[in-house]
Image: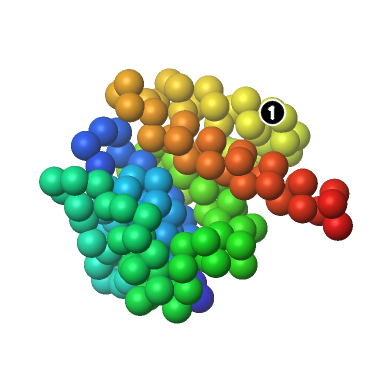
């Protein structure tokens, strides 16, 4: 499957995410509880851009599972267990920028070779770029950290 750049449609700052349509849609559906949408940067349509919105009320865990089973053939919990590393990697692509700015920002971050320096640079960029008190990027980062810790624990327990 091909990774695409998506704009996360939300009432706050402009964010983008890169990944496979099903993984991106699952992440956005789960984290936003159905209140965010997605638009592919190239204007094409796929399963992620056809994700249902729950504008007048957040979706439930059952709604997320129903969508996941219909589009991916398994529940959200199973997707999380089977594709944890892909979900974590996709969460780590979230940037507070519009699709046109993304490549330039990625080039700057790619030039930073030390992982700690990169983490600090990303955090500083995010804090400077974000204008809303609604820290969407922080929510994505928190989920990536949570998944990373779960993965590390599983590896240690063998």
Is residue 117 at least partly visible in the picture? yes
Residue drawn at point x = 32 percent, y = 21 percent = 133
Point out residue 131 in the picture as x, y percentages from the top left corner: 31, 23
Residue drawn at point x = 64 percent, y = 58 percent = 85
Q: Quadrant of residue 123?
A: top right
Please name the residue that numbered disc 1 is placed on.
117
Residue drawn at point x = 63 percent, y = 31 percent = 119
Q: How many marks?
A: 1
Q: Is the residue marked by circle 1 packed among few (<14), some (14-19), or many (20+) residues within 10 Å?
A: few
Q: Quadrant of residue 29?
A: bottom left
Above or below 72: residue 37? above
Residue at the limit of the structure toward the left, as seen here: 56
68 and 119: which is toward the camera:
68
Is residue 34 at least partly visible in the picture? no
Point out residue 46 in the picture as x, y percentages from the top left corner: 31, 72
Residue drawn at point x = 34 percent, y = 45 percent = 32
Relative horizontal placement of residue 136, taking residue 140 as reference (left or right): left
Point out residue 144 in the picture as x, y percentages from the top left corner: 57, 43
Point out residue 51 in the picture as x, y percentages from the top left corner: 27, 63
Above or below 95: residue 45? below
Relative horizontal placement of residue 141, taking residue 150 as reference (left or right): left
- The colour scheme applied to this rendered structure is rainbow
Label 1, secondary structure: give it.
Answer: helix
* On-image quarter of the C terminus: bottom right
């Amino acid at each position: 499957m091909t990774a695409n750049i998506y704009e996360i449609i939300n009432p706050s700052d402009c964010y983008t995410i890169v990944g496979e349509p099903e993984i991106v849609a699952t992440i956005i559906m789960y984290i936003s509880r159905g209140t965010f949408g997605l638009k592919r940067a190239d204007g094409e349509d796929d399963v992620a851009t056809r994700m249902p919105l729950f504008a007048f009320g957040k979706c439930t865990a059952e709604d997320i599972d129903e969508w996941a089973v219909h589009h991916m053939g398994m529940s959200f919990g199973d997707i999380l267990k089977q594709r944890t590393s892909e979900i974590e990697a996709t969460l780590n692509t979230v940037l507070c920028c519009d699709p046109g700015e993304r490549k330039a920002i990625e080039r700057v971050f790619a030039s930073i070779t030390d992982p700690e320096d990169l983490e600090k640079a990303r955090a500083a960029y995010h804090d400077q770029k974000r204008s809303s008190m609604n820290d969407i990027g922080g929510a994505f980062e928190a989920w990536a950290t949570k998944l990373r810790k779960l993965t590390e624990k599983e590896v240690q327990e063998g």
